[in-house]
Amino acid sequence: MLKIGIVIGSTRPGRNAEQVARWVHENARKRGDAQFELVDIKDYALPLLDEPVPPSMGQYSKPHTLTWAKKVASLDGFVFVAPEYNHGMTASLKNAIDFVYAEWNNKAAGFVSFGSAGGARAVEQLRAVMGEVQVADVRQQVLFSLYNDFENFSVLKPNPAHDAALSTMLDQLVAWGGAMKKLREEKAAAAQRTESRKGAAA
């Protein structure tokens, strides 16, 4: 069964992202086509990127990087819960993405965002970043308005219409996540065959 991480994309004290992520989790766990878990980047205490070698080289040297890489590697897909700060994604989420590379590759992602404009601009940034780390992002997204979906801008009171948007997004995410998992398995099998041929020829 696919393993999907619901990534809480903020570390700010008093953040709204955690309650949004829990809403996603409560709805997603009713499904039977994947396993869903909360992944809080705050729990990994990632400093501002401190790896001396670019992550695409795969030469991680810091314990916090290795711990984060193991978590990302264990997942087949992601729901990024993305608040919008100053027309963009949070620095903490971008930093967490930048820490590793291969662990993101050939997986799928969906987005749940919020902000004064529904977090749409944060997601637009995320879509560009996903392409660079080789993550396939699905079309459907869920956008919460700070004005209409939160009481006093701080307590989530979502419009019931968001349930349908979430369901569609998760349908797409599970479908793409399954396809990408098959692709990773095929690539791994091909690499193993290549290594076997090299060994036989040595």
Image (tube, rainbow, N blue to C red):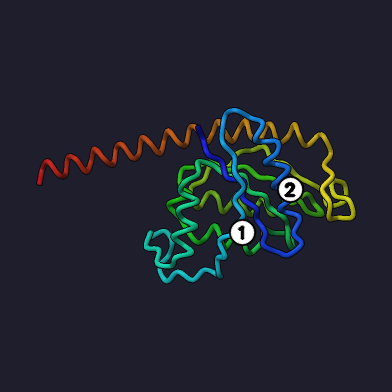
Image mark for residue 156: none
Camera-nearest residue between 2 and 144? 2
Q: Residues within 10 Å of mark 1 (few under 14, many from 20)?
A: many
Local SS, label 1: helix
Q: Mark 1 sits on what residue?
A: 93
Query: Looking at the image, which residue is at 74% across and 50% down?
Result: 19
Query: Looking at the image, which residue is at 35% across and 39% down?
Result: 187
Q: CA distance from mark 1 to mark 2?
A: 15 Å
- Direction from residue 80 to residue 193 in the image, left or right: left
Amino acid type at image mark 2: Val
First-in-chain label (1 vs 2): 2
Image spot of residue 176 (x, y percent)? 54, 34
Residue that extends furthest to the left in the rendered view of this protein: 202
Q: Mark 2 sits on what residue?
A: 20
Q: Residues within 10 Å of mark 2 (few under 14, many from 20)?
A: many
Image spot of residue 130 (x, y percent)? 55, 50
Which image quadrant for residue 56? bottom left
- Direction from residue 111 to residue 155 in the image, left or right: right
Q: Please tell me whether residue 183 is drawn above or below residue 63 in the rendered image.
A: above
Camera-nearest residue between 119 and 21? 21
Local SS, label 2: helix
Image spot of residue 173 (x, y percent)? 59, 36
Query: Looking at the image, which residue is at 50% across and 50% down?
Result: 72
Residue that extends furthest to the right in the rendered view of this protein: 152
Amino acid type at image mark 1: Leu
